[in-house]
Amino acid sequence: MELDTNLAIAVDLKTQDEESDVKYEITHSFSSTSMGSGTVRDQNGGVMEPGQYRTIIPNSYNYTFTSTDLGKRKIYFTIRDSNGQIKRDSVEIEVANIPFTFSGSSESNSVYLEEQTQFNFNLKSNGNIENIEYKISYEILEGNGRLTGVNGNVLQNSKDYVVELGDFSFFYFPESLGSHQISFLVTDNYGQEVGPVLIDLETKQNDFNVNITPSKTSEFVNIPINTIIDINEIPEETNDTYEAFYSSGKNSSLRVNGTEYGPGEKFQLSPNNNNVVYLGSETGQHNIVISVESSANVTHTASTAISYNQIDFLFTGGSQKSDISVGEITSLNFNISESIGASNYKMRYSLNGNALIKNENGVVVSAGNIYEVPKGNFNWSLEGTDESNITLTFYVQNDTGLEKTVIISVNVIPKDYNFTANATQSKAYTEEVVNTNFNITELGIGGDTYMMYFSSGSSNGSFEFQGNTYAAGESFTVPIGSFQGQYTGISESNHNIEFTVRSSSEIEKTADVNIDFEKYEEFFDLTVSQSSQDKFEDKPFQLNVVTNATSGHDTSVMYQMTFEFASLNGGYVIHQGKIYREGEVIPLLYGSDAMQFYPQIDDSFTINFRVENSTGISQSTSESIIMLKKPTVAVKGEKHNISCGGLNGCDYVVRIYTCFAANCSEAYNGATLQQVEVRIYNRKNKRWDTMLFNYNDAKGSGVERYFELEEEPKENELQYLDQDYEIRVQDNNGQWSNTIRGTIVRV
């Protein structure tokens, strides 16, 4: 029987006594020599497990057997009755594969590298293949290549792929030259193999043909010729790459894809038509040989011939003037005439000397550059830029490479001019501005521009022109004709100033000016005075600073002042709304300049003033400031018991002392104490009370001076007992002392 199919087994059970009540059971088992097992089903399709009994009635039955394993089986069927009798019978079955055949071949056994060839296969089987699956695998035994399915999918080496019975195909692409051998093997899902089927083929090298075809076989020198280089691939569309070079035995070039190549230089070509341009730059026959090598290392050559001819012409030229001055323009006249043929012309020139050359459109043309020129008469121009004997050589060349020359000479005479300079004064003070007059007069054609600079030797000075100041050696543009500048001497010395002018024609002229500069010193007297008002701490007073130049004042001279204190630092100066402290520079107005001094102490002090002007002259003076010293206060506050001894006991009083044995309030500078201000906390009303007393109304005797604030018969009725106070005194100048704080004490 075949694998995985059903085989009928007839089971026949008969009894000798049909009326008997005996019961029967059946089971089955596989012999020990059986290869594999299988499944036994009863007449109803129920699976019968080996070794398990089931009831059976005497009759004829069709059992079935199926197996998925190959090999021979021996099945024992055993029947037992209810009386213990046992009967056994057996069947032998062999499970075998379904045979199949597999064959294959190549459509072509000789192909080119990477050329596709088809492998055709046939798979046949005559049995029941309902549950059979076939897989194919391959192995490349010789050569290199790739195998694809009909849809282009690449098949991997030694990997299984499902195939169907019948005809099918694969495609093979050889990737190496020489012999190729591919082995194919087909296996069914029961492990049955057919193969290997071997396919052999040979791979040939890709080839090609090459041809070169010019559009013309005759032309004038330097005229390009369109040419086709045709590469015909064998087989078609192999898409190899191609490298080529050419030779011609003549001077020439080949333009491929916009790039020029000479003989022997390699360039790339593509399959099929390549449009190139051949240019012969030498007369005669050009025997062109093109050599092409493919990426498959195959080389072929092709050849052709082109004859190149040359055109003759006549070239003349000359200058309208042979002598000009710098800046003058003369015409350069040329003529080109042909005897036969037609060509285009280009011209270049070389120059010995300096000149400005322009073409017929007024555009500057440079020596060594090549310019297109017309046939017949045409004109360029020459402008002399400096003194020189100019020699120009003009070279004209036609398309065939024939070149002719013309030499033209022009003598350029330099431009000239006169330059003068003079100062309006020969003596001046340092930093004083001296006007200097200049004149530039052009000789001849003129039209130059001019630059000027100055030098003053070891003397130090500057020059101002048109609002800009220049140091020695700095160049600046000056006009033609008369103009004026200003020289300022900085150092004290005799300034020998040399002014140098250079024209755009490189002509240089100088003119000297002598000015003796002396240093200006402005001597002056200095007076500082203070206002006559009394001086109090924190009350500013006026200071007047007077400067007087003894020989006259130069308004360009500036003054400044500093001050310092001889001992005590008394305060600061306020000048034009700005505060200046000791040592800071105060700008002064010449003459009388007022400012304020703000005292910050009440002790007298001395201020030392120093004034210096911009010529380096200085003066110093001192001013003593007598300050009216504010009074000082001496205070103590006490609670006293008075009038003690009666039936009512003592009275109680709170006193403020402003003079006592240990200390006493005091006024200064002849002033007298005038008032006493008392601020004290009222513990009853919970506020500060303020009281003002005339100093002379104080009570007491000797040094004891006091003011009674309150008196009460009971101590606990005192408002100021044990409270804080603040006391100050005022003198008859209106100055208050500093405030002294304290607390009422009990004595």
Image (cartoon, helix red, strand yellow):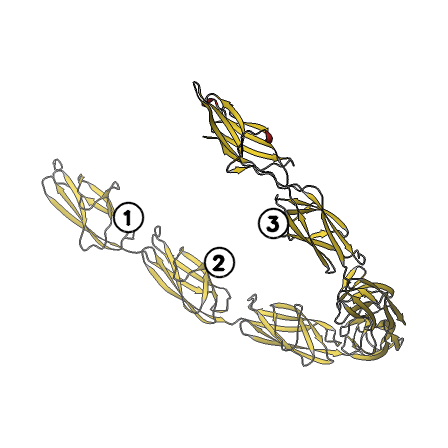
Amino acid under label 2?
Gly
Comparing 491 with 502, the one in front is 491
The secondary element bearing badge 3 is classed as: loop
Name which of mark 3 and mark 1 comes first in the sequence: 1
Residue 9 percent location from the top left of the image: 23, 47
From this view, report whether residue 339 is shown above or below residue 519. below
Amino acid under label 1?
Asn
Residue 339 percent location from the top left of the image: 85, 78
The secondary element bearing badge 2 is classed as: loop
Residue tagged 1: 6
What distance separates the C-alpha of mark 2 from that of mark 3?
110 Å
Name which of mark 2 and mark 3 comes first in the sequence: 2
Comparing 216 with 291, the one in front is 291
Looking at the rendering, in which quadrant would you find the C terminus? top left
Comparing 600 with 633, the one in front is 633
Residue 317 appears in the picture as rendered: no
What distance separates the C-alpha of mark 2 from that of mark 1?
42 Å
From this view, report whether residue 55 is shown above or below residue 679. below
Residue 98 percent location from the top left of the image: 32, 56
Q: Nearer the viewer, mark 2 or mark 1?
A: 2
From this view, report whether residue 351 is shown above or below residue 424. below
Residue tagged 3: 568
Q: Nearer the viewer, mark 3 or mark 1?
A: 3
Residue 490 percent location from the top left of the image: 75, 65
What distance separates the C-alpha of mark 3 from that of mark 1?
136 Å
In the displayed structure image, the side of residue 379 where residue 579 appears, left or right: left
Residue tagged 2: 152
